[in-house]
């Protein structure tokens, strides 16, 4: 009962913050939009070429946008001391971290997922590819944030946090990148994306099971 | 679950394996292991390279270039094995709180990273004449590259804490997270590789004559010995550095 | 609901060296403990360790509630240098978040009462970012008064009088005295002098 109370308080607070500070979710979205818009300037705007790189560009762009929000997880709280409230709660820290990552996934992920089909149009991807790509991004963003929560928790008090977070987290997102982008590519070639999407979902479940525990252990290490 | 070193000490004091958990006790042992390691590494490498380069026949398909496998394959194996060893010592350190375990994992990391670099380097040297390019996105090479990233992340994380103890535990945790993910990453990279039709010829993929196999085995042992010796050397340096306040180190240096 | 605290050979390490010599103490309900020490002596570290926010490197810290061992998260409320309030949220939102994490359902009346006791009831709906340092501190201290019943939690206060004006310091001293009378344990560190009427007074000198 009191776990639900605490977890929902954590969850609600994230959305209060999203409502107060629109930049929290709008900036990652803008980052995503701009990154995706840069590529045609670099590689040219022929439809065939854009279609070839579209899936990869959009997927990696979404991952990077989500990556940039990782410091938001614990850094501000560590500065203003609210992190102590989380650590000092009698409820399992892993569940509270999970609630927070879930809220962040929705708050950050939803705009990215909604923008994905739009960019699929700009990259001349057919609508069925766009839908699967949006689904793949929807699976990838929480995965990245879950894995990233571990690194963000470790680096709360360390030097050079943001870049080191990227170095630690990005290699671990390769499975979800391969399966997610693979699923959209499969549809592009007229095949079923089911196998890739299942594997991507499996990796998300795996991260869901282990990451909160690792992240709470990490928080205890770094705030000790 | 996790203990401090003091608590572990109260629990395990007097057991045979606990005797060497103290850096002071392990320091001379590490020295002996290091000497044996260097000796074995050099001897075995000379024998292995001699057999591999002068005795083993030329490969029917790949010509002389194939001989890089005597270095490439053992290095790739060691890169993998050392990561697991690192994760093992990290886990030990987290559970028992022993500082020697953390030092062990810090000592292993650079050697593992070097092994990954050797594997990538020799892979590229082999790739140029065989594939016509230094790098192809072959599943095994790509996996080794990712493994290298994991090593770099581990070392960068360990270096970014001013408080050594914190850095120990933090990097140990990330080593464990990496170790859990490595099989999944390998699986996914394989999946991706078959999807995108990588090259079918790989270092060491053709059937080998038994003398080639002998040379490779000897070289593998040589690499093992080198890695053990290098890790022990680094471990000794770390012990001296970290325990520099302790009485026995002061007497040793005097 | 009698609180008790036992320290046995407690030591804390920072950067590989012990901050202070081992502390052993038994502290009963209604005791005011003044944690004294120079800068860097480890006052904050000790208070954080007592709050369960950091691990001690050796020894044992045991909180007791009604004779039974309890975790620090149940037995204590900690107010440190930072106010534990997010600037973008209102005082009320921040305090209800803190209350929920401490296991209490949303009770605006209790929060209002706590704010009132510190004289900052009017600020309940203001965003923390718009408040002065002193106002923030008062609002943060209101968190202490959210406990189920007076005296049910030990207060761990790290420099509570910083940024408070004379009247507010008096007010806080009064609140601490009341809490002690209700059976709480209060541990505080302070560079300022203060006077708190207390049945029992102990010092931990670091």
Image (tube, rainbow, N blue to C red):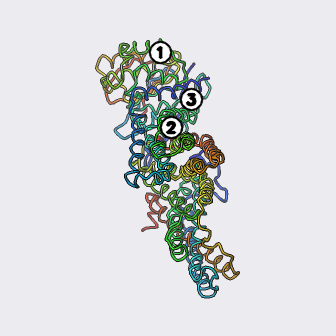
Chain letter of mark 2 equals A
Return the residue at label 3: A90
User: Which numbered tag is attached to residue A197?
Assistant: none
Q: Secondary structure at mark 1?
A: helix
How far apart are labels 1 and 2 at the CA level?
57 Å
Chain letter of mark 3 equals A
Farthest right residue in view? B210
Foreground disc of the pair 3, 1: 3
Residue at position x 47%, y 27% from top?
A15
Residue A70: % across, % down: 46, 41
Is residue A216 at least partly visible in the picture? no
Q: Quadrant of the C terminus of chain C?
A: top left
Residue B167: % across, % down: 47, 51
User: Which numbered tag is attached to residue C181?
Assistant: 1
Quarter of the figure with residue A138: top right
Residue A5: % across, % down: 56, 23
Using a 10 Å C-alpha cutoff, classify the residue at mark 2 as few (fewer than 14 neighbours), some (14 to 19) or many (20 or more): many
Q: Judge by depth and name the residue closer to the eye, C135 or A67.
A: A67
Q: Secondary structure at mark 2?
A: helix
Q: Are marks 1 and 2 in contact (CB under 8 Å)?
A: no
Whether B97 is drawn above or below C115: the answer is: below
Is residue B75 at least partly visible in the picture? yes
Return the residue at label 2: A113
Q: Are marks 3 and 1 in contact (CB under 8 Å)?
A: no
Residue A120: % across, % down: 49, 43
Q: Judge by depth and name the residue closer to the eye, B195 or C171.
A: B195
């Amino acid at each position: 009962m009191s776990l639900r109370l605490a977890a929902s308080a954590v969850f609600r607070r994230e959305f209060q913050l999203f409502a107060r500070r629109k930049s929290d979710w709008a900036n990652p979205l803008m980052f995503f939009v701009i990154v995706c818009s840069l590529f045609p300037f670099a590689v040219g705007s022929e439809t065939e070429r854009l279609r070839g790189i579209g899936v990869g560009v959009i997927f990696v762009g979404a991952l990077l946008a989500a990556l940039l929000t990782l410091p938001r997880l614990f850094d501000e709280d560590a500065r203003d001391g609210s992190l102590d409230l989380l650590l000092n709660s009698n409820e399992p820290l892993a569940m509270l971290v999970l609630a927070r990552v879930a809220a962040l996934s929705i708050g950050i992920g939803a705009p990215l997922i909604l923008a994905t089909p739009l960019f699929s149009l700009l990259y001349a991807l057919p609508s069925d590819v766009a839908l699967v790509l949006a689904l793949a991004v929807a699976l990838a963003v929480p995965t990245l944030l879950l894995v990233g929560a571990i690194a963000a928790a470790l680096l709360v008090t360390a030097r050079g946090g943001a870049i080191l977070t990227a170095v630690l987290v990005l290699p671990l997102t390769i499975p979800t990148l391969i399966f997610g982008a693979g699923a959209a590519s499969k549809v592009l070639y007229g095949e079923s994306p089911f196998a890739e999407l299942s594997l991507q979902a499996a990796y998300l479940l795996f991260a869901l099971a282990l990451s909160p525990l690792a992240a709470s252990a990490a928080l205890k290490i770094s705030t000790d | 679950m996790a203990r401090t070193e003091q608590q572990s000490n109260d629990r395990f004091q007097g057991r045979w394996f606990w005797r060497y958990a103290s850096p002071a006790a392990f320091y001379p042992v590490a020295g002996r292991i290091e000497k044996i390691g260097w000796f074995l590494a050099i001897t075995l490498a000379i024998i292995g390279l001699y057999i591999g380069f002068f005795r083993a026949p030329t490969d029917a398909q790949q010509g002389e270039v194939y001989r890089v496998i005597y270095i490439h394959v053992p290095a790739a194996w060691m890169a993998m094995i050392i990561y697991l060893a690192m994760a093992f010592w990290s886990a030990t350190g987290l559970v028992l709180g022993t500082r020697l375990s953390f030092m062990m994992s810090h000592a292993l990391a650079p050697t593992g990273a070097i092994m990954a670099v050797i594997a990538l380097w020799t892979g590229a040297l082999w790739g140029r004449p065989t594939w016509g390019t230094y790098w192809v996105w072959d599943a095994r090479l790509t996996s080794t590259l990712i493994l290298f990233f994991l090593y770099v992340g581990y070392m960068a994380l360990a270096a970014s804490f001013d408080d050594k103890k914190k850095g120990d535990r933090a990097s140990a945790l990330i080593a464990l997270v990496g170790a859990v993910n490595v099989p999944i990453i390998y699986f996914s990279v394989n999946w991706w590789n078959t999807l995108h039709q990588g090259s079918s010829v790989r270092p060491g993929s053709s059937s080998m004559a038994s003398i080639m196999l002998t040379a490779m085995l000897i070289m593998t042992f040589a690499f093992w010995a080198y890695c053990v010796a290098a890790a022990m050397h680094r471990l000794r340096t770390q012990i001296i550095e970290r325990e520099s306040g302790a009485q026995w180190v002061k007497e040793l240096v005097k | 609901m009698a609180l008790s605290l036992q320290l046995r050979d407690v030591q804390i390490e920072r950067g590989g060296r012990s901050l202070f010599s081992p502390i052993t103490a038994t502290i009963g309900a209604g005791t005011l403990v003044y944690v004294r020490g120079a800068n860097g002596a480890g006052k904050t570290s000790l208070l954080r360790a007592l709050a369960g926010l950091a691990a001690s490197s050796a020894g044992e810290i045991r909180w007791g509630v009604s004779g039974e061992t309890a975790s620090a998260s149940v037995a204590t409320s900690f107010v440190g240098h930072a106010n534990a309030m997010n600037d973008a949220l209102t005082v009320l939102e921040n305090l209800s978040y803190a209350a929920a994490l401490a296991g209490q359902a949303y009770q605006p009346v209790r929060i209002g009462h706590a704010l009132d006791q510190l004289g900052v009831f009017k600020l309940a709906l203001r965003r923390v970012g718009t408040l002065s340092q002193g106002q923030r501190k008062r609002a943060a201290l209101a968190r202490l008064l959210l406990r189920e019943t007076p005296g049910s939690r030990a207060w761990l206060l790290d420099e509570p009088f910083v940024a408070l004006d004379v009247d507010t310091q008096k007010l806080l001293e009064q609140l601490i005295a009341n809490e002690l009378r209700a059976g709480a344990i209060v541990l505080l560190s302070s560079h300022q002098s203060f006077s708190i009427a207390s049945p029992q007074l102990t010092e931990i000198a670091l």
